[in-house]
Amino acid sequence: GAGVSQSPSNKVTEKGKDVELRCDPISGHTALYWYRQSLGQGLEFLIYFQGNSAPDKSGLPSDRFSAERTGGSVSTLTIQRTQQEDSAVYLCASSVDGWYEQYFGPGTRLTVT
Amino acid sequence: ILNVEQSPQSLHVQEGDSTNFTCSFPSSNFYALHWYRWETAKSPEALFVMTLNGDEKKKGRISATLNTKEGYSYLYIKGSQPEDSATYLCAQGSSNTGKLIFGQGTTLQVKP
């Protein structure tokens, strides 16, 4: 079946612009996660959606970052007024439920110039 | 231990060598321990999910053990092959949240 998909695969943007990153999870998966990997760093948790519960936003680095998940499926991560330190690979993952194995998408490589 | 920690950070072995890595995690509020393999230019792929103290799981030449009381897990690779070269990530799930906290990973390089 179809896996987790993300778009775009690459995004180059100018400092100060807003960007939107999209994630399509595996159908039926109730849990959706956003992570990022900055150069030389490990996987950093950003935000976690579980069903209809309020999302766990504890990993968002600043109020420039926001995410939503519409209809319990597709999710969009928005970064406003991008900064060079936002350059990273942004990964989305979904799972059947929290704590189960996560299936990762191919990632979006964001470069802020 | 407050965070998930992995050691060593990197490892270089010869083809055919057996190797192992360590993942240490907080033992309080433990729910699950995950291992993922992350190959260059690919997405992380789940290897194992373990929940019970004493769990042992095996997939081909790769196996893992779990000790929740002392807060550690070992990943073993028997007879390493060049295709095993990847970063191996462990992650802990806590009982009070469904999110995973990942370690920094162990990068394995297997030389032919």
Image (cartoon, coloured by chain):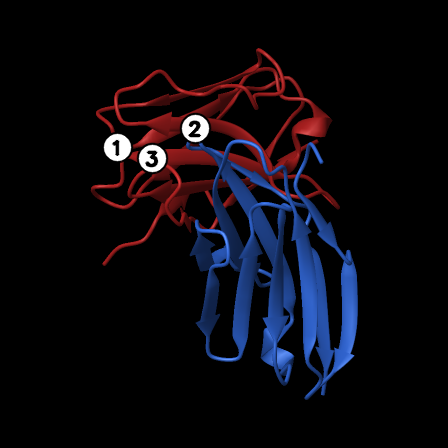
Chain colours: A red, B blue
Tell me the quarter of the picture where residue B106 sits: bottom right
Extreme-top residue of the structure: A63
Residue under mark 1: which chain is it in? A
Q: Which residue is mark 1?
A: A73
Is A50 placed left or right of B54 in the picture?
left
Q: Quadrant of the C terminus of chain A?
A: top right
Q: Which residue is mark 2?
A: A48
Relative image position of residue A46 (x, y in whole percent): 54, 28
Disc on res. A31: 3
**Pointers 3 and 1 in contact (C-beta within 8 Å):** no
Residue under mark 3: which chain is it in? A
Using the numbered discs, state the Cα–Cα distance from disc 1 to disc 2 in whole angstroms.
Answer: 13 Å
Q: Amino acid at mark 3?
A: Ala
Residue under mark 2: which chain is it in? A
Using the numbered discs, state the Cα–Cα distance from disc 3 to disc 2 in whole angstroms.
Answer: 7 Å
Relative image position of residue B10 (x, y in whole percent): 77, 61
The crowd level at tag 3 (other Cα within 10 Å; few <14, some 14-19, many 20+) is many
